[in-house]
Amino acid sequence: MLFAAWMAELFPYLPRKNQQEIIAEITDALTKRNQFVFESGTGSGKTICVLAATLTYALENNKKIIYTTRTNAQQQQVILELRAIKKKTKDSRIIGIGMQGRGNMCLLAKDNPEMQNGSSEELSRFCSHQKKLAVSEKGKGCSYYKRYLGDKDHVGTIMEWMQKNLPTAEEFIGTCEKQGICPYEVNKLIVHDALVVVVPYVYVFDKSIRIKLFDWLAISEEDVILVVDEAHNLPDYLRELFSAELSTWMLNSCLMEADQFGNPSLADGRVSVAAFCKEILDVVTVLRDTYVYGVLEGGIRRINNEKNDALIPSHELEVEILSRLKITSKTLKDIVSDLFAYGEKIQEYKQKGGKLPRSYLHNLGVFLGFWTSIEMDQYIKLIVDAGEGKNPRVEAYCLDPSVGTDILKDVHCSIHMSGTLEPLDEYRDSLGLPIETRMAMYPSPFPPENRKIFFVRDVTTRYDEMMKDKTILPQMWRHVSGICNNFKKNTMVFFPSYNTLSMFKKNGHFAEIQRCLYIEEQHMSQSEIMDLVTDFKSCGDENGDGAALFSVMGGRISEGMDFPAEQLEIAVIIGIPYPKPTARQRGLQYFYDQKFGKGWEYTVQAPAARKMLQAIGRLIRNENDRGVAVILDKRAPRFHQYIKDMRESKDLLTDISCFLKR
Ligand code: SF4
């Protein structure tokens, strides 16, 4: 009934059949408090469906919606859809806000690179001190906070404007900046009245940040409807969030800190801070030499250049520290406590000096405390040779994303969606969702004849074969340059990694592309990427000649950016983006084999399929879009279960030409 009302009166667009089904299913899941996991093709309008269903239910049942996204671009999309609903309904109860991390919202941190890299805890301490100064000492502390406290009229006007206009986070921050008022503080006020809060994953899955968010919202977990957008990213995101590492760069920073702030002794004079750090530095280097480069035999080191990480025995790091320093594990615990205490003092000192309260020694204490208490059934310990041999690190890598999903059991209902989530049972099992979780796959609502996918059998990026057969790479390049040079259409070429992209670049191949060429670089800022994409899109306009954009699968462009109509008509996939066979990847595969009996399917095949489908998904964003994708790898047929409409091409240029002319 509720759903019928939305469809008839309030849904802001003409609903497609798929969308009606999705809304009905979500409404039922909300009513029965089931978890709901679903896949619906990229561009099929999932966001508006989820908002329509959850808003109706939330208003009727006094709930709030926390909508989580991976990127700021996805967050913007949610706010725009919410605006469309509000415009149609004119319902003043629909208040939604987009929140970003404090690094983006703190105006003092905005143009300060050190602050931008601060952790949420460091920025929170920095802010507390600035606020304290602002109220207690004249002429000191954060001016944006002072204005926030002292100009209630202005704050009230901003809040009214927000409630009425539903700005994106970027628009809101810009407005506050113009008024000289802290956006973070205004957000905290308004979030209490918001019905929908759109946040990055970290606000929900990092417990310390989540507690703050729920306090501002002033609600209990069971009154929250949680939405996870682009959910295929969540397992990897959680693995990263719950992993920890200690690099030689960080240990050198600890030494500099000891040099700058004094070098006290630890554990009742057993060892000085600097001596302790130097010992760990040496242990990390020896671990790298032993496990990554190969065991020293007769004084000869066997360097293995193909390897850059290795598993290490679970207690090797601490056993080595104990034996070198001739201390017991009880003394090591005392050392860790002393590092905490000493680090706290440094943090306070920096805080008082108006700096980011970061202490590397404190972080070292946190790391060692964590490292020595890990449950080894959910983690592996690795030594990684990073920074071209200059920055090796030890890493506790979290294999099991379910360590961070307790919140999913506590909320009223969680809805997980993506354009590429298959196999759904892998997602459910990875996150530890109950077996009775609802799962659904919705076919693409767009005409199948508008999309063609070809693959070829004469090339591959399989390493062994490329090494053996030197004709493969030139043939691969002939395909790429042939497609880019023969069709005056906007074309995107997706490489499996930045390394492969730069390999082609170094070989001088790019000079053969006879059209406007854009290249995504790994270290581009978000605004640089946006500029690049805007320029590329404009080449697909009526008057444009079409351009080529070289990008990577699994990157910021291939996932989450829209290229409707002529903005993109051809997508070229170079090779199968299998994960690199690192020790970390092997550990993950083994874990999934042990737990679910599907290591290869869940950790190799499914992630590679998702990356390809995300890239192909950029082609078709509505009923009228047409596009052709080409997979340049003979292994493509292994993915028929994911890409059912894929066909072999014996003559790529003719096949593409026929499709485009149709
Ligand atoms: Fe930053 Fe706002 Fe805190 Fe000032 S009050 S330090 S602008 S977050």
Image (cartoon, rainbow, N blue to C red):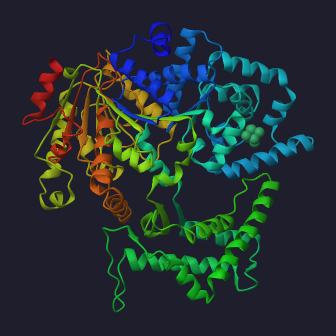
Residue at the far bottom: name it. Answer: 298
| For residue 86, side relative to residue 548 (left or right) | right
Does residue 444 show up? yes
Residue at (66, 41) in percent of width and height: 102
**Residue 524, percent from left and from top:** 47, 43
Q: Residue 197's quadrant in the figure?
A: top right
**Residue 190, percent from left and from top:** 71, 27
Q: Relative to 39, does residue 53 appear above or below in the rendering?
A: above
| For residue 639, side relative to residue 219 (left or right) | left
Q: Residue 188's quadrant in the figure?
A: top right
Q: Nearer the viewer, residue 608 or 262?
A: 608
Tell me the quadrant of ligand 1: top right
Q: Relative to 43, does residue 517 appear above or below in the rendering?
A: below
Numbered disc total: 0
Looking at the rendered image, the quarter that the C terminus falls into is: top left
| For residue 460, side relative to residue 245 (left or right) | left
Residue at (50, 10) in percent of width and height: 10
Q: Nearer the viewer, residue 442 or 110?
A: 442
Q: Relative to 283, does residue 197 appear above or below in the rendering?
A: above
Residue at (45, 49) in percent of width and height: 432
Residue at the far left: name it. Answer: 650
**Residue 415, percent from left and from top:** 47, 34
Q: Nearer the viewer, residue 612 or 527?
A: 612
Does residue 552 show up? no
**Residue 156, percent from left and from top:** 78, 21
| For residue 475, side relative to residue 263 (left or right) | left
